[in-house]
Each structure stands twice: as C-alpha cells, then as structure tokens.
Amino acid sequence: MTKPKNELPKLLTIRQAAEILNVHVETLRRWDKGGKLKAIIVNERGDRRYDPKDIETILKNKNKHGN
C-alpha cells in the first residue's frame, strides 16, 4: 500500500538546500557527483530535489566537525 500524496515528505529545491546549508548550488552538484549528498532527479530535464532528512544529517555532521 502506498502513502497518500499529502503524506510524502516535502522535497527541497537545490536553491533551498544550498541556502539552508550555506553553500553554493554548484557545491551541491559536486556533492551529488561525489556521493556526499545524493539528489533526487525529478524530471527529464534533471532538476534536483533534496530530502530534508539528508540536509539535516549534513547539518549535524557540519556542526559536529566544526566545518
């Protein structure tokens, strides 16, 4: 059984994720290629979206290591 659409987690755009993490959007693209923060490709054009849980994990690690 699948979840109703209104229960799906809200995904963040690349700009929203970059703003939250205080990095440039190109940094997020590099992180995606390098496997540090995987993006979800949402259409044929290749638009990236990010799971807020993944952003939270990066923030926790960033704060833990003082980066």
Image (cartoon, grey):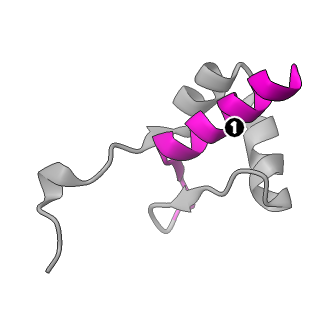
**In the image, residue 4 above or below residue 56:** below
| Quadrant assignment, res 59 | top right
Residue at 32 percent across and 48 percent down: it is 9
Tell me the kind of residue under disc 1: Ile
Give the overall secondary structure of the magenta segment. helix
Residue at 17 percent across and 74 percent down: it is 2
Q: Nearer the viewer, residue 44 or 39?
A: 39
Q: Residue 23: x percent and y percent?
A: 76, 24
The C terminus: image quadrant: top right
Q: Which residues are magenta?
A: 45-67
The local crowd at label 1, few if under 14, some if 14 to 19, many if 20 or more residues have their Cα within 10 Å, is some
Disc 1 element: helix
Check residue 29 for magenta coloring: no
Q: Is residue 33 left or right of residue 41?
A: right
Q: Residue 25: x percent and y percent?
A: 71, 33
Residue at 74 percent across and 41 percent down: it is 28
Name the residue carrying label 1: 58
Q: Is residue 26 left or right of residue 39?
A: right
Residue at 76 percent across and 22 percent down: it is 63
